[in-house]
Image (cartoon, rainbow, N blue to C red):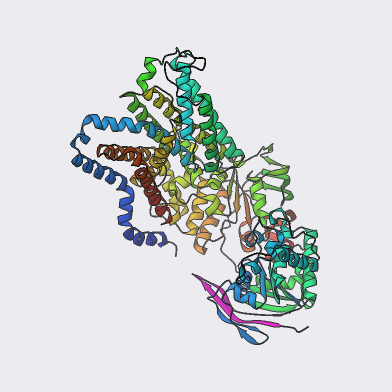
Amino acid sequence: MAITLLEMKNISIEFPGVKALNEVNFTTETGTSHALIGANGAGKSTLMKVLSGAYNHFTGEIFLDGQKVNITSPKDAQNLGIQIVYQEVDTALIPYLTVGENIMLNETVNDMGKKQLINWKTIHEKATKILASMKINVSSKKLVSELTLAEKQMVLIARSIMKDCKFLILDEPTAPLSHSETNELFRIVTDLKNRNVGIIFISHRLPELFEICDDITVMRNGEFVSKERIAETTQNRIVEQMLGKKLEEQFPKQNVNIGNTVLDVKGLHDIDKIRGIDMSVKAGEIVGVAGLVGAGKTEFCKALFGATKVTAGDVYLHGKKLKIKNPHDAVRQGIALVPEERRKEGILVLESVATNLTSANLKRFTNIFSLLNFKEEKKTAVEMVKSLGIKTPSEQTKVQNLSGGNQQKVAIGKWLITEADVYIFDEPTKGVDVGAKKDIFDLISELAKRGKAIIYASCELSEIIGITDRVYVVYDGEVVKELDTNKTNEEEILFYSTGGK
Amino acid sequence: MNAANPIQKETPKKKSFELFDFLYKYGTIITILALVIVFSVANPSFMQGSNIINILRSISIVTIIAIGITISLSVNGFDLSVGSVASLSNAIVISMFVWFSQNTLVAIIAAITASLIVGALNSFMIVKMRIPDMLMTLATMFIIQGIALTYTKGATVSQNMIMPDGTFSTGVISPFFAKLGQVPWIIIIMVVAVVLVHIFLTYTKHGRYMYVIGGNQEAARLSGIPVNKYKVMAYLMSALFAAIGGIVLASRVMTAEINAGAPYLMDSVAAAFIGFSVLGAGKPNAFGTFVGAVLIGILQNGLVMMSVPYYSMDIVKGTVLAFALALTYYKMKS
């Protein structure tokens, strides 16, 4: 079988205000599996999107077998035999069509020509053939909506290799899969490799990459770091390369007297992701929940807050067992959550800053007839805007007119007015610029100083190291390690976050 | 870098949209004034006190029902069943007098209870079964319309009607009840409803919670607001105001005609949506709804005086609704 060589040279791409890729080189060939790894925001997905034609404004060149090719649309990439399977499989599938129709979708859309009638027999025949060749045991007449996540992924892979496929990009395919499903995926990957397909495998899980891949390319901050044979490197070395030189950020470290245990979580389970989390938080303590994207941090925060269904486990606050069925119960009993998706879940974009700030604790501004005290509301809002440094023309400005960092501050400020005992922060610095980050850290340590118990969930390890007192490392919905922040470092946390034991 | 950002962003925006913003805020009121001038010129009797009272009387039932829709809109819901609920309430209240010789209190309580059951059904199906509100209330609209028809056996209920057994009904509608549908009481009821709901939505925490839910349901839930409770409340209140609308209608016409409430749905929806923009509120609000109803009332009254046939009226009303919707959604986009 002829081997095809893929080379990406000096790829750069810019988005408003960010240089996402800077002169990146990437080479791989058919018949091998190539791992692409890097911390969040390193540019792995962006690079692969360039290769698959999702962007057309990049600079640099792409060569196939030494021949320069022009990829400016997904169709260009597909015609060259480059296929990508994104992590969000549901966006690429049509749930109320059958497996066969989904697999043959590209063909029915692009290659029908003048034909008007669909030949169902050929569609299902072809689809069944592909499924059989991949040894996937799914009927081509089943509806996609009835499939499991893993099966949907298989369907997408089947669709990708329908046509002549030279390179198949899998963007974090294993994040939502169980262990046995992962093994099944690996069997298919190996199988495809033997059929002279080049696999590019993006993942955060090092042990996996070492199991399945031949080569590994490491990226950091939009730049190429290294390319090595898997056989010639070690997991620790890769982690070092991912982190690079450590950036010491300024975190406000204050001396806080840590008090008694406030929150105690025992064996928390939710419907699918969280499998028995134990943790405790003391007054004045900032406890980190570290883990990679998809490890279950957000799910844990939501389950603790009653926003998703808890199937087992107990939560104790000041030694008293809590009954939390929904967020309303959680708020009443003194737990606050600053959610990750704040535009979607944390704020009301069409309402004013004041309305947003008071929405979680409107009771404080009402009299016995539930009438609102606008004067008091305004006063508190103005104070909060000032103490948080929210950059807004007035407290009556609609939140949609504020920048991301300031929206985040509004979402946090909302809970500061509430006076909870336990504050849960889920990725509070996501999408926030450096200046606002500092303000948010100040805020959080200020809360700790006032004796609040704080849970800080983040995949930004430098922040975990900088701000927390203790860290729980979460991997695959479980706490795999509890670490004392003073006695650990990013390497160790990353080691456990990637499934190291 | 983000220090000056929000302020910078706003200034240029304001300039280009100044005219639109002005028209958005005051357009409805300007339109009302323009209509008043046009109609007064065309027909001097338009501005007479009796005609103004006539207009207010004619919009009171629309306003009361529209107030209910406004509440359902505030939680980002939509209640299409209000017209049918008004029909049902109308039929029950009249039949209580005519068929069962009950007193005013019993008649009103019966009508309101039946309507609240409908509201409870709506909210259960929407909140628990997660059926989209518009579809569910569309279904209820037909169900309740059918129930009201079945209850009256497809006939108009009135005093001295012929009963199925051939005798005449003996019950009478109490004179006190008859007062409700007459000036000034009908107007007073409307004003009280508008004022109460305006206070409820704007000055109480419950109203604020409803707007928060309407603005971002997930954020509301994570803020600890009992979202389902307030949605149920909104649909119950929507049904309650529809019931009051039906009762007032009954008192005004003293009969229960087939589907008497149905025509009010369209006018009420239009009034509530016109209300979005009044004074730049940008969301459903009681005062705006009242202004919307005034606009529709004036249009209807003036056009009738200018001898536009009643059967062409729907063209005008539909156009006004489309225009109000265009204004609201174009504003949201920008």
Image-quadrant location for residue A252: bottom right
Residue at 70% in and 67% down: A159
Can I make out residue A373 in this image?
Answer: no
When the figure is inspected, residue A433 is found, relative to residue A218, above or below; the finding is: above
Q: Which of B327 and A141 is in front in this view?
A: A141
| Numbered marks: total | 0
Quadrant of the frame with the C terminus of chain B: bottom left
Dominant secondary-structure state across the stretch colored magenta: strand
Image-quadrant location for residue A91: bottom right
Can I make out residue B307 in this image?
Answer: yes
Magenta-colored span: A1-29
Q: Which of B137 and A35 is in front in this view?
A: B137
Residue at 58% in and 57% down: A253
When the figure is inspected, residue B38 is found, relative to residue B4, above or below; the finding is: above
With B154 as the anchor, is A245 left or right in this view?
right
Residue at 47% in and 14% down: B102
Q: Residue A187: x, y in percent?
A: 81, 67
Q: Is residue A66 magenta?
A: no
Image-quadrant location for residue B36: top left
Q: Residue B74: x, y in percent?
A: 46, 41
Q: Residue A409: x, y in percent?
A: 50, 54
When the figure is inspected, residue B186 is found, relative to residue A234, above or below; the finding is: above
Q: Which of B164 and A376 is in front in this view?
A: B164
Q: Residue B245: x, y in percent?
A: 42, 29
With B47 as the anchor, is A293 left or right in this view?
right
Quadrant of the frame with the N terminus of chain B: bottom left
Residue at 70% in and 44% down: A310
